[in-house]
């Protein structure tokens, strides 16, 4: 079962990377809503986008991705893996989400954003690094605690239903 959950986590991480790839297909400006406010403001000043477009992209990202990821883990854990209790649901969801988090931190944040030009927005290079050390610490802490909380809440709800 652990191997299956690991693969499900890898697939979720790949899905996340796919969403990012689609988001930057016409340039990193498509995902500028993930950047700091100073980068967003500079992009508006340069005429690359507007604050309204940034808000729209942010809302679209949240409307599609968050429910999509939640649906994915619920289907994996309860429909595919056949979980029936809180603890099994909790640990499986937490492992799947944690694998995605590790992939996001190392493959997306560290490598893709930090070491390639794919996420560079012309005219904002002086604002790099786009993801600072403080950002990384916050993402690790929030990711770990937040994903544990999400897993617990979802497993609690599912335990009442299943």
Image (cartoon, rainbow, N blue to C red):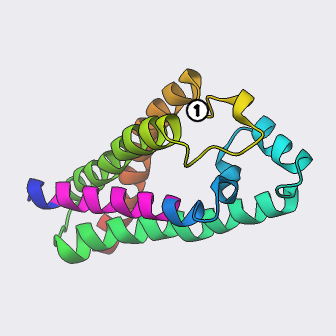
Q: Looking at the image, is 162 positioned above or below residue 45?
A: below
Residue 27 shows in this picture: yes
Image point (49%, 41%), residue name: 116
Q: Is residue 7 above or below residue 108?
A: below
Is residue 126 toward the left or the right of residue 71 in the image? right
Residue 51 in the image: state x and y as whole percent: 86, 55
Name the one closer to the observer, 65 or 35: 35
**Residue 128 location in percent, x, y?**
65, 29
Quarter of the rendering containing residue 148: top left
Magenta range is 5-20
Query: Residue 162 sits in which quadrant?
Result: bottom left
Task: Name the dominant secondary structure of the magenta segment.
Answer: helix
Q: How many marks?
A: 1
Give the labeled residue for mark 1: 131
Q: Which residue is drawn at 73% across and 28% down?
A: 126
Q: Where is residue 159 in the image (x, y as percent from the top left)?
A: 30, 65
Q: Is residue 15 magenta?
A: yes
Q: Residue at x 57, y 22 (%)?
A: 134
Question: Among all residues in the image, which is located at the extreme bottom?
Answer: 79
- Residue reaching furthest to the top: 133
**Above or below for 62 versus 111:** below
Q: Is residue 90 left or right of residue 38?
A: left
Residue nearer the viewer, 119 or 56: 119
Is 120 above or below relative to 1? above
Residue 42 is left or right of residue 127, and the answer is right
Disc 1 on helix, strand or loop? loop
Q: Is residue 7 magenta?
A: yes
Q: As rendered, which of 139 and 77 lies closer to the eye?
A: 139
């Amino acid at each position: 079962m652990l191997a299956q959950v690991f693969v499900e986590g890898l697939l979720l991480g790949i899905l996340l990377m796919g969403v990012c790839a689609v988001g930057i297909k016409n340039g990193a400006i498509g995902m500028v809503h993930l950047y700091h406010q100073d980068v967003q403001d500079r992009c508006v000043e340069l005429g690359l986008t507007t604050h309204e477009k940034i808000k729209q992209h942010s809302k679209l990202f949240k409307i599609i991705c968050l429910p999509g990821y939640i649906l994915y883990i619920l289907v994996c854990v309860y429909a595919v893996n056949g979980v029936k209790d809180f603890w099994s649901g909790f640990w499986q969801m937490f492992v799947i989400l944690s694998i995605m988090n590790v992939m996001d931190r190392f493959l997306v944040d560290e490598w893709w954003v930090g070491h390639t030009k794919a996420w560079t927005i012309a005219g904002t290079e002086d604002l790099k690094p786009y993801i600072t050390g403080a950002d990384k610490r916050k993402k690790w802490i929030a990711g770990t605690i937040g994903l544990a909380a999400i897993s617990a809440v979802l497993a609690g709800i599912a335990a009442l239903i299943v």
